[in-house]
Image (cartoon, helix red, strand yellow):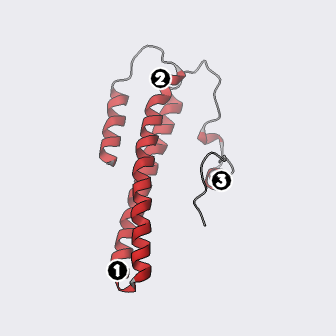
Amino acid sequence: DNNIVKENHQNKRANKPSRHISKKEAVQPLVATHRSIMTEMLSMVKHEMTLVNCTDADRDTIDEYLNELGKTQEKQLSLIGTLRNSLVEYYASRPQNEESALSPTDFPPHELDSGILSDDTFEDLRD
């Protein structure tokens, strides 16, 4: 549930140690949040496929489809926002003395959205 992700994230932020943390320690909340969100998103995609298939088979359910589609998109945007906030917090809390990759703010938004920064480690599920 998204509320659990937010609570875990807030608890981790409130309990930040004052000592210097390693890059590995700093990235742990980000990875945990990402894993949780991806699990929820996968479940949502499965629900969407069922929704699309049912609506495709019975067009009389279009009103339910539209309602569910709107709710699903709102939830997905919320999850993406939570992940984005976790990423921003990682960049703010990572050890400053270590060389690191570029932050997401180093790229124009269209490059992030266009897939220019993607790699081949994830299966492309688009048709």
Q: Which mark is residue 63?
A: 1
* 41 in relation to 13, above or below: below
Spatial distance from mark 3 to mark 2, Cα to Cα?
A: 28 Å
Q: Quadrant of residue 14?
A: top left
Q: Residue at x 60, y 41 (%)?
A: 105
Say few, some or many: other residues with alpha carbon within 10 Å of mark 2 (under 14 / 14 to 19 / 20 or more): few
* 30 in relation to 38, above or below: above
Q: Residue 77, position in %: x, y?
A: 44, 56
Q: Residue 79, position in %: x, y?
A: 42, 50
Relative to 96, is 54 on the left or the right?
left
* 24 in relation to 105, above or below: above
Q: Indicate the secondary structure of the residue bearing disc 2.
A: helix
Residue denoted by label 3: 115
Say few, some or many: other residues with alpha carbon within 10 Å of mark 1 (under 14 / 14 to 19 / 20 or more): few
The amino acid at mark 2 is Glu
Q: Indicate the secondary structure of the residue bearing disc 1.
A: helix
Residue denoted by label 2: 25
* 48 in relation to 24, above or below: below
The amino acid at mark 1 is Asp
Q: Residue at x 40, y 85 (%)?
A: 59
Image quadrant holding the C terminus, namely bottom right
**Total marks drawn?**
3
